[in-house]
Amino acid sequence: MKRIVPEFTLSEEQLNTVRTLARECNLCEETVRILYGRGIRDKDAVNKFMSPSKSHFISPFNMSGMRQAVDLITTARDEGWVVLVYGDYDADGICASTIMRGALRDFGIEPFVVVPERKDGYGLSNELIDRVFDEYFPQLVITVDCGISCAEQVEYIKELGAEVIVTDHHELPDKIPDCICINPKFNDDYIYDNLCGAGVAFKVGCALNGDSGYKYLDYAAIATVADSVPLTGENRDIVYEGLKLINERPAKNYAQFLSKQDTVTSQTLAFTLAPKINAAGRMNDAKAALELFAERDENKIIELSNRLSEYNVARQKCCDELYADAKRMIREKGSCGRIILLCNENWNSGFVGIVAARIVDEFSRPAILFVKRGDTLKGSARSIDGVNVFEALKACSQYISEFGGHSQAAGVNVTEDNFENLERALDEYMRSNYSEEDFAPVIFINGTLDGAYNQKFVKELELLEPFGVGNRRPLFAVEETALPTKRIKSTHLSLKSDKLELMYFGGLKHKKLLESEISKRLVFEYNVSVFRGKETVKGFVRDVVYDKRAFISASEELALSYLETLSCESSGNIPVLPISKAADFAASEEEGTVFIAWDENGLNLVSGVKNLDCNIFVPSLRSFSKTVLFAPSADADLNGFKRAIILNETFGMRLENLNGVEVYKVQGAEYPSFLNELSCERDELLSIFAHFANNTGAFEGGTVYEVVKNHSFANPLQTAFALSVFVQLGLIAFDSGSLRVNKGVKSKLENSELYNIVKGVKNG
């Protein structure tokens, strides 16, 4: 079950410091609390963070190797050397190459630029170096976003007669190339070490051309966001200034990817622009992105922009197919332990990292997806917050041919015969070093809205932009019970809260939960919009969390949902599962079992089930771990589960997404006790029918559940029972979102299977 926890907890002494800082900086205490918790803890740091600017840029000459690089580049210009820029195929590498090319041109050098394709591998390779020298025979090679781990390849370039300058930002290896190296990770006077590759290229450009190098801040900003480096320190200043440039006068080379109406933010760069640049490299045509950023002909810019957009669509399709394939393998595997390892020789190595991240997000555990190439399995690893996959790989390195990376992402190669050994060893490491709680999804919040929101505080939150890695968008929680909802377009909801107007994009599947009396916490972010000069504050809901035993206070909602299930046609004979076998599934480490119940009697039927996480209406977690689902909605997506075990007696299963799911009913399952509360008296049912017949057209709702929830009735459960019976008898139907009485239709109550079931339950 998801947990909501504070992003940080401050002591009383720290809170006193926060209050003092808030007064000194004329900011809300809540704003300063967020900054303080994120390590910004004095007046100068707060003011600098709240006012990002190029005035905060660090001198590029504080970086070791910079003066020597400028001197060598000056010699290359003065003596007319052939200069080649060697980049990388991802968005950071493409932007870094673009910046370095522009900076050298401005300095008086017309360089050649080469980026490898993904099939060539990352970094310098002797094969590509040979091709480069055959075509260009450079006298100076400048790497961007690569090279620091390529000492042998640098020596090879030098043997071929060229000088080398390495500009990179990756972690320093044990052996540094014997050439001029520029990297913020060196222990020098450059006080910020989190620049991306394009950020380093930007600093070289500034060293060469002074402040005129700032015209490439847009590309530096795009790369900084795309490469997921922390948006703190100088990176924050780069992205802030780069976004200003993009919004004021975007370059034609990427303008096709941006909306003309909307303000471009760091989220725009991350989710709209960067994926299209990366798609070119993933589709083995990184050169297309490089050409786009160099092109001046508008027709060719449109052509190349369209090509990158098409690549991105194709990339999304391939990732979706790979993702579906990976989930199928997980379901067939049954148990994934504390880490997921999958391999397929048909997968594209350019997509496994993306899909591994999706698997991590969905299953809340680290994942490594491998592609088989001969006897070698080439893998991409991703991890959850708090679990260091790099250290895990290091601890199991006896089974690994090669690996590298950091705590949240890594590349790893193994031989085929060591795959199972590595899987077993990694699972044992995870179990020994992390508790079960470490794998539970966590939502970090920065406060709780108990009453009216603070307008000044909400406005100050806007000043924390740009958001991203290292500076996440602040989230807040609000406690709610029943909330009226309004459907917006296809899957969005508008929520009516007395504290704040809320929007839930993609929240339709939670409509029943939101409208129920179940106590829940909505996690949201503040959003300020301006329309015709008027500012409006809304909360954008990001998640809904409730207590795992909330069903106890939701008996009416569970009963109404159960009646929906009983009112459908029979799903045929459901296989009966012995109680002991169901208990085995509850105790097993095997994943993929969902237990379905409608009351506590069903929950108590099988030992061990009560200890599992509980969800209401739809699975709240996107993973397919063992769970209990109370009163599933008709549109509850159970397609990823391996089996569904029903704990209460039922007539049918009105579930749309059960493809490939094994469905069982536990032996001895009984109808929920709340059926005893229903009346089968003819006169009472007829009076309810008369009420609807006399007010035809006045009842909105596309289902019995919606009609009952949308309108006030003295006894909602009895009304829902009667309506469900009338549906089975054909006396009423639903048309265009409202209830319709079918006049002239006659039938006996005994013709309703639901009526007979409830009457039988009441008669014992």
Image (cartoon, grey):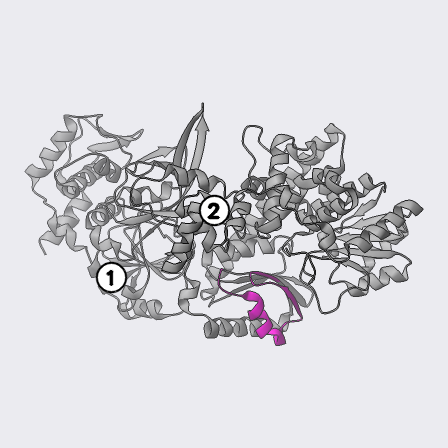
Q: Residue furthest top?
A: 532
- Name the residue located 41 percent from the left edge and 34 percent from the top edge: 490
Relative side of 2 to 213, left or right:
left
- Name the residue located 73 percent from the left edge and 40 percent from the top edge: 211
- Name the residue located 40 percent from the left edge and 47 percent from the top edge: 30
Q: Position of residue 267 (x, y in %)?
A: 54, 42
Which circle's residue, 2 or 1, is located before the other in the chain?
Answer: 2
Does residue 90 appear in this view? Answer: no
Relative side of 76 to 34, left or right:
right
- Asked if residue 84 is positioned above or below residue 666 in the image, the reply reads above
Give the labeled residue for mark 2: 473
Identify the magenta region: 385-410
Helix, strand or loop for disc 1: helix
Q: Position of residue 604 (x, y in %)?
A: 22, 64
Give the labeled residue for mark 1: 603
Q: Position of residue 34 (x, y in %)?
A: 44, 50
Tell me where residue 718 sits by quadrant: top left
**Image quadrant containing the C terminus:** bottom left
Viewer-proximal residue among 545 and 166: 166
**Image quadrant containing the N terminus:** bottom left
Q: Decide: few, some or many residues near mark 2? Use Cα within 10 Å; few <14, some 14-19, many ≥20.
A: some
Three-letter amino acid code of the residue under disc 2: Arg
Three-letter amino acid code of the residue under disc 1: Leu
Relative side of 383 to 185, left or right:
left
> In the image, which is nearer the foreground, mark 2 or mark 1?
2
Does residue 635 appear in this view? Answer: yes
Relative side of 573 to 526, left or right:
left
Q: Position of residue 184 (x, y in %)?
A: 68, 57
Cα distance in 3D space between marks 2 and 1: 39 Å
- Asked if residue 473 is positioned above or below residue 613 in the image, the reply reads above
Q: Decide: few, some or many residues near mark 1? Use Cα within 10 Å; few <14, some 14-19, many ≥20.
A: many
